Amino acid sequence: MLDTVPITKEEICKPENLVYGRTPLMTDATLSYCPGCGHGTIHRLIMEVIEEMNLQADTIGVAPVGCSVLAYDFLNIDMQQAAHGRAPAVATGIKRLMPHKFVFTYQGDGDLAAIGTGETIHACNRGENITIFFVNNGIYGMTGGQMAPTTLPNMKTATSPFGRDIETMGNPLKITELIAMLPGTYYVTRQSVHTAANVRKAKKAIQKAIEYQKLNKGLSFVEIVSNCNSGWKMTPVESNKWMEEKMFPFYPLGDIKIPK
Amino acid sequence: MTKTKDIRLMKGNEAFAEGIIRAGCDGYFGYPITPQSEVLEYLSAQKTKERTGMVVLQAESEIASIHMVYGGAACGKRVVTSSSSPGISLMQEGFSYLAGTELPCLLMNVVRGGPGLGTIQPSQSDYFQTVKGGGHGDYKMIVLAPASVQEMYDFTKLGFDLAFKYRIQVMILSDGAIGQMMEKVELDKQLPRLTDEEIIKKYPWATTGKTADRERNIITSLDLNPAKQEIMNRKLQAKFKRVEENEVRFENIHCDDAEYIFVAYGSSARVCEKAVQLGRAKGIKVGLLRLITLFPFPYEEVARLSKQVEGILTIEMSAGQMVEDVRLGANGAVRVEHYGRLGGIIPAPEEVLNVLEETFIKTKTYA
């Protein structure tokens, strides 16, 4: 017979019983993201890995323009805010002059795949020894849900209110596949964080990307397909379902380029 | 042992490049453009990584160059970029961000004629863009105007010193003539680059990695709270005022007894210096106020001279930009006129002296 002595709340809260804690690399600031948004989870995963690898004192992050422009309010590390799209150039300047530091950019699809296309492609092609985290939600979230380079065909946004017409508005850009073709990139992967299983996989990808930078292997690129329930005008649950049904067929999850 | 001077014959662009190496520069990011490509070429040939450990990188654009500068400057490093007019136009975004984050760096513009693709010959038509702020927002940068190859060299160390003293951008506003001409240059000893430990000590604001003994460092120009943003802007303005109070630099050439003066900088100042000699030989009491800093502008010196002289002629290879600041300084006390050549043409000394005579002397009416 099992021991049925009831466990008290105090007992449960003992430090030795702790199975999961909030990383001290996240600050106490309240996240500014909409409820249901993936940014908070992605922030936490990156900070957990940096904590686990004991890299806080060696990390310099670059925040973009977009919803995550205030990322430095939430991440307890040294950070620079970059002009729209320029994060890979800023990170290049940091890494070239501080080669022993861990340098990453955190960018959305408008930032990385539209206005910053040039900086992105060339940093990747030079094989800058940095890590790029690319959060792709197919829309400009912060400015109010306008069409992004990654917006799917026929998808309705504030600047394509009748759906993205590829005849006049062009095709969605699979920039991650494009980047994987460049010799300067070492590890290119596409992940998501909408289920517990996907969170675990995404964390592994982030770990690898950081490990490769420590080994001076060149540029690692981690795309995370995420939702924008506000911009997509859906509930968080609907948006995750829509992401699975519409986004993943066009942006399939998994590794795109892995080290030989 | 006798001390021998290290004197070399160099192009202005090369002197600038050698100057930044010797001033302890950590990184240069640039993109080729005529007439300043020698800077990147010279640095690339110098094997700077072996010489001092300095990083030299050819970027994919001037936009990338200036944002690489931003990344390095935010780490407390001594970083530089240079370009010529069309490339400098592209960098304005970065200049504005560097101003908003108060990052120190050294910039250089070998000005060529515009607008548009313009010409590759020397011009001074970027005065407004540089001195009044070409990017968005209320900001200034210190602007130094070299008139010789020696000054292209000397202003690199001065530029770094000013940049870090005030946490401000310093622009060396050169032109196609100063950048391309060859003159002798006296070089200084190599200054050591700062170590990472020295940077952490000297520049506690730099993003060098958050250690347990301090809060995280954040380099940003964003504040969505207008009250806080106004405080930030007032802080910037107070800094610019300190610069105006302490860093005005100019040279008076035969101004003491002058009845007329030229006001000029850069290549035009050299033309005017010769014109002063020609004028003095003809018995005209003419002098030259040579501007060395364009921001801060020597308004007080212009005001002082305005009460002494009978006419001021500004010479600038533009349609008349710097003349506006001279008129502000003169504040109506004396007639101020402008003469300039456009499109890459340098005026001759005889030409500008003739304009001075035609404008002020031959038209003089006596009561």
Image (cartoon, rainbow, N blue to C red):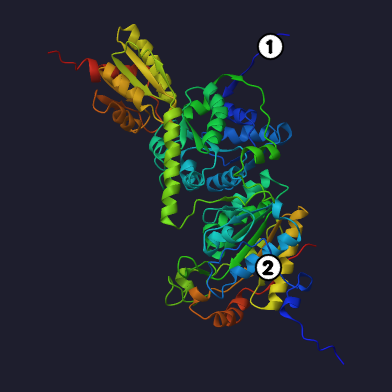
Disc 2 crowd rating (10 Å Cα; few below 14, some 14-19, many 20+) is few
Q: Is residue A35 visible?
A: yes
- The answer for how far apart the CA atoms under marks 1 and 2 are is 65 Å
| CB under 8 Å between discs 1 and 2 | no
Residue positioned 51% across, 45% down in the render: B98
Query: Looking at the image, is B65 positioned above or below residue A259?
Result: above
Q: Which residue is mark 2?
A: A22
Which residue occupies the extreme bottom position in the image?
Answer: A1
Which quadrant: the C terminus of chain A?
A: bottom right
The percent position of residue A133, horizontal first and vertical second, equals: 64, 62
Q: How many marks?
A: 2
Q: Which chain is disc 2 placed on?
A: A
Query: Looking at the image, is A131 positioned above or below residue B58?
Result: below
- Dots 1 and 2 on the same chain: no
Query: Looking at the image, is B16 positioned above or below residue B282?
Result: below
Q: Which chain is disc 1 placed on?
A: B
Name the foreground residue: A213 vs B356.
A213
Which type of secondary structure does the marked residue at label 1 adopt?
loop
Disc 1 crowd rating (10 Å Cα; few below 14, some 14-19, many 20+) is few
Which quadrant: the N terminus of chain A?
A: bottom right
Q: Amino acid at mark 2?
A: Arg
In this rendering, which labeled residue sits more in front, label 1 or label 2? 2
Q: Is residue B328 left or right of residue A153?
A: left
Name the foreground residue: B134 vs B37.
B134
The percent position of residue B203, horizontal first and vertical second, equals: 61, 40
Q: Which residue is mark 1?
A: B3
Residue positioned 72% across, 73% down in the render: A200
Which type of secondary structure does the marked residue at label 2 adopt?
loop
Name the foreground residue: B354 vs B162.
B162
